[in-house]
Image: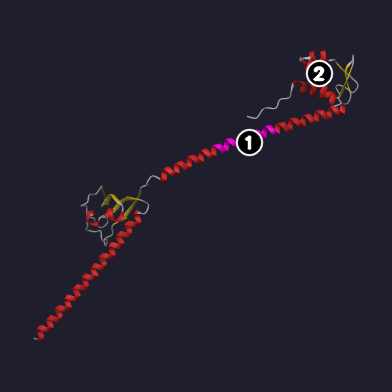
Amino acid sequence: MPEKFETPVYARIALDLARKIAAGELAAGSRLSGRSLLSSTYRVSPETIRRSMHLLEDMAIVRAESKIGYVVLSQEQAQRYVERFRTQVDLQSVRNEIESLLLDKQRIENRIYQLMDYLARQADRLTSVNPIYPCEILVESQSPLVGRTLSETKFWQNTGGTIVAIRREGRTIYSPGPYAVFLPGDLLLITGDASVEQRVLDYISQSTKIADSGDTAQNGRFGDDTQKASVLSDGDRVR
């Protein structure tokens, strides 16, 4: 906390006298009471009054005269003194406010650093945890999965995905075993990492291509056998 600016007692007394002189309550040439009387009026020690009057003398507002006390010299000087004091107080008030704002700024920065550190630690913690991503895959009627079991397809080994349930004709089969058979219209509920859905789709697509190529090869073999049979039949006819 910045120190609160407090005007010393002797300076406050000097200011009070200067204000009275500046306002014309104490005209130039008028006499002020001696230190003893002034100390009684302001309820302070004579030494405090001496310091107050010395301050006014330095500003040429009053003058000490022996056996008389103090004489008022200048209303104009008193007005300048009052104005200068007001400016000093304003400047000190601004300094105090600046110091207070700087302390607030430091507290805010410290809090921001604490929150940033907390955020960074939480982010590190989250990145160290493998999140689980769910997805749903529909088994089409032409899918190569149809009629095959989980074990036969080596589903987890090929996709990294775990089938947690199969939705089939309005019911849900939870944790299907290795001998569960895929049927057309099955909705597979799968969990895995962020790319599990794409790997499943790629696996099905690749399996489809393999199945298609197998059918083509099989058809080719059938065609060759038919050709051979035709040739044999022609030969038999020739004989």
Q: Position of residue 35 (x, y in %)?
A: 83, 15
**CA separation in Å, label 2 and label 1:** 39 Å
In this picture, is 183 found above or below 89? Answer: below
Disc on res. 150 = none
Quarter of the figure that contains the N terminus: top right
Q: Is residue 104 visible?
A: yes
Q: Which mark is residue 50?
A: 2
Label 2 packing within 10 angstroms: few (<14), some (14-19), many (20+)? some
Q: In the displayed image of the protein, which residue is found farthest to the bottom?
A: 238
Q: Nearer the viewer, residue 13 or 125?
A: 125
Helix, strand, or loop for circle 2?
Answer: helix
Look at 27% across and 51% down and name the residue there: 166
Question: Dot 1: within a 10 Å radius of its alpha carbon, few (fewer than 14), some, or many (20 or more) residues?
Answer: few
Residue stretch in magenta: 94-110
Q: Amino acid at mark 2?
A: Arg
Give the mark toward the camera: 2 or 1.
Answer: 2
Considering only order in the chain, which callout, 1 or 2, is on the residue closer to the N terminus?
2
Across and down, in percent, residue 173 comes to: 25, 48
Say if the magenta span includes residue 97. Answer: yes
Q: Which mark is residue 102?
A: 1
Q: Quadrant of residue 18?
A: top right
Q: Is residue 135 left or right of residue 176?
A: right
Q: Quadrant of residue 92?
A: top right
